[in-house]
Image (cartoon, rainbow, N blue to C red):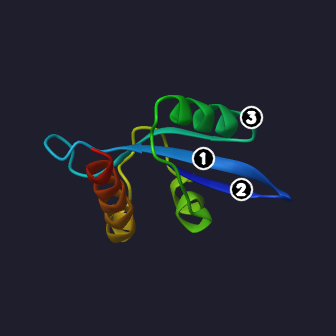
Amino acid sequence: MTADKKNSETKKTVALKYNQNTDRAPKIIASGKGSIAEMIIKKARQENIPIREDKDVVQVLAELNIGDEIPEELYTVIAEILSFFYDLEDLQS
């Protein structure tokens, strides 16, 4: 999940899901701003889903629809984020 927060701007959040066995690319499974973004983040924390704040990535992803795959130009960035999360998960195991 990626989140963007700035004091003077509305918070935006986009949640991604990726199954390397079945998905061609990560897909957007939730997106919102303001109170919806807060609810998405709260749910992610309750489920121990890692959160990464990156306003540039969120800006691009927030333009897409739920169910859309991420655009190819973000493959490298998202792969790095997912790799970090997988490594973190391995360290915690």
Q: Earlier in the sequence, mark 2 or mark 3?
A: 2
Residue 13's label in the rendered image is 1
Considering depth in this image, is 67 or 7 the residue closer to the camera?
A: 7
Q: Do callouts 1 and 3 mark residues in contact (Cβ within 8 Å)?
A: no
**Disc 1 from disc 2: Cα separation:** 9 Å
Q: Position of residue 62 (x, y in %)?
A: 57, 52
Give the labeled residue for mark 2.
5
- Which amino acid type corresponds to the residue marked 3 in the rendered image? Ser
- Residue ID at (60%, 61%): 59
**Disc 2 from disc 3: Cα separation:** 12 Å
Q: Quadrant of residue 56?
A: bottom right
Q: Earlier in the sequence, mark 1 or mark 3?
A: 1
Q: Residues within 10 Å of mark 1 (few under 14, many from 20)?
A: many
Q: Secondary structure at mark 1?
A: strand
- Which amino acid type corresponds to the residue marked 1 in the rendered image? Thr
Residue 39's label in the rendered image is none
Q: Position of residue 25 (x, y in %)?
A: 27, 52
**Disc 1 from disc 3: Cα separation:** 10 Å
- Residue ID at (68%, 37%): 38
Considering depth in this image, is 76 or 66 the residue closer to the camera?
A: 76
- Which amino acid type corresponds to the residue marked 2 in the rendered image? Lys
Q: Is residue 17 left or right of residue 11?
A: left
- Residue ID at (57%, 63%): 54
Give the labeled residue for mark 3.
35
